[in-house]
């Protein structure tokens, strides 16, 4: 049988989600815990492979294995075995044709910015600290040029483009949510290229600073030139927020931050 799980993790200690030969990864820790809990080796598949240092609040994984534990027993067991910076928040049995990656209808990320004269202190989440005035009104206009299925070669590593990998992706929504001193850049789409959201964020910040005109974003997208876009922002302010499926309802697992950003709850 197949089981899907919604997990969250702090990516600081890991070289991304995917298994690495010589560095630790989130996948390695999950498979290690599952091997102990289920007394068998299992392979874990994820909705989206996060890069080194990137966090998750609603990553989804699945594995195939037979076991006697109830879902609750499995979650308690795994959470007792996993490092403190990885946690299972929800799990359920799913159809045999379910795949965390290929069954995913949309993926959502949020990039967190703190725009203040002085650095943030001990807050629950990590953020990108930016000093100086930022104007997000033109950013909202610029973001309209990102919506739809487009070639996002300008927003990924040049080496990936040269390798011939397909660089077309679909973006469904880009929202700028301001809650002084924090700004949340929410992006929803079919999937994302390596470093794509961090480069998009760097470009949108340049618009907020007045370095790039909002209408220029259309030209940057059309140029397929990495040098035309902004810098790649740091990974530890980026969060995999949610993965959506037709056959894995996880309403109770949706993180409070997502509900807040989308106006589904009040503080």
Image: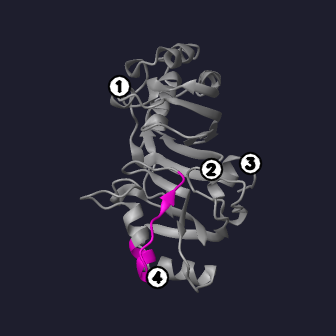
Give how far across and how far down residue 36 sits, in percent.
41, 82
Decide: is 82 above or below 233: below
Estimate the x, y position of residue 104 in percent, counting from the top left: 62, 50
Q: Is mark 3 on a helix, strand or loop?
A: loop
Question: Which circle's residue, 2 or 3, is located before the other in the chain?
Answer: 2
Q: How is the image coloured?
A: one colour
Q: Give the range drawn in magenta.
A: 32-47
Which quarter of the figure is the C terminus placed in? Answer: bottom right
Using a 10 Å C-alpha cutoff, classify the residue at mark 2 as few (fewer than 14 neighbours), some (14 to 19) or many (20 or more).
many
The residue under label 3 is: 263
Disc 3 from disc 4: Cα separation:
38 Å
Residue depth check, mark 3 versus mark 4: number of the one nearer the observer: 4
> Compared to 67, does 84 lie above or below?
above
Q: Which of 8 and 205 is in front in this view?
A: 8
- Callout 2: helix, strand or loop? loop
Question: Within 10 Å of the Cα at label 3, are there few (<14), some (14-19), or many (20+) other Cα atoms?
Answer: few
Q: Is residue 42 magenta?
A: yes
Whether tag 2 and tag 3 are in contact, CB under 8 A, the answer is no
**What residue did someone put label 4 on?**
37
Residue named by callout 2: 104
The percent position of residue 162, horizontal first and vertical second, equals 35, 25
Mark 4–mark 1 contact, CB under 8 Å?
Answer: no
Which is more foreground, mark 1 or mark 3? 1
- Crowd around label 4: few <14 · some 14–19 · many ≥20 (10 Å): many
């Amino acid at each position: 049988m197949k089981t899907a799980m919604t997990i969250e993790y702090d990516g600081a200690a890991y070289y991304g989600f995917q298994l690495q030969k010589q560095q630790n990864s989130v996948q390695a820790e999950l498979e290690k815990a599952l091997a102990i809990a289920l007394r068998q080796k299992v392979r874990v598949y994820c909705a989206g492979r996060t890069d080194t240092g990137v966090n998750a609040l609603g990553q989804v994984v699945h594995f195939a294995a037979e076991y006697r534990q109830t879902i609750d027993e499995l979650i308690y067991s795994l959470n007792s075995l996993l490092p403190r910076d990885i946690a299972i928040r929800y799990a359920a049995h799913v159809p045999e044709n379910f795949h965390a990656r290929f069954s995913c209808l949309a993926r959502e990320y949020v990039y967190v910015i703190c725009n203040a004269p002085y650095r943030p202190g001990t807050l629950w989440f990590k953020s990108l600290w930016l000093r100086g005035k930022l104007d997000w009104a033109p950013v909202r206009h610029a973001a309209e040029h990102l919506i739809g299925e487009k070639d996002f070669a300008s927003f990924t590593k040049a080496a990936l483009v040269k390798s011939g990998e397909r660089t077309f992706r679909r973006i469904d929504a880009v929202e700028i949510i301001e809650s002084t001193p924090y700004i949340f850049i929410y992006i929803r789409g079919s999937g994302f290229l390596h470093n794509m959201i961090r480069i998009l964020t760097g470009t949108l910040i340049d618009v907020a600073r007045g370095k790039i005109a909002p209408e220029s974003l259309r030209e940057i997208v059309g140029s397929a030139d990495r040098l035309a876009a902004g810098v790649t922002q740091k990974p530890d302010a980026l969060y995999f927020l949610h993965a959506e499926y037709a056959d894995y309802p996880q309403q109770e697992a949706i993180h409070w931050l997502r509900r807040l950003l989308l106006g589904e709850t009040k503080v």
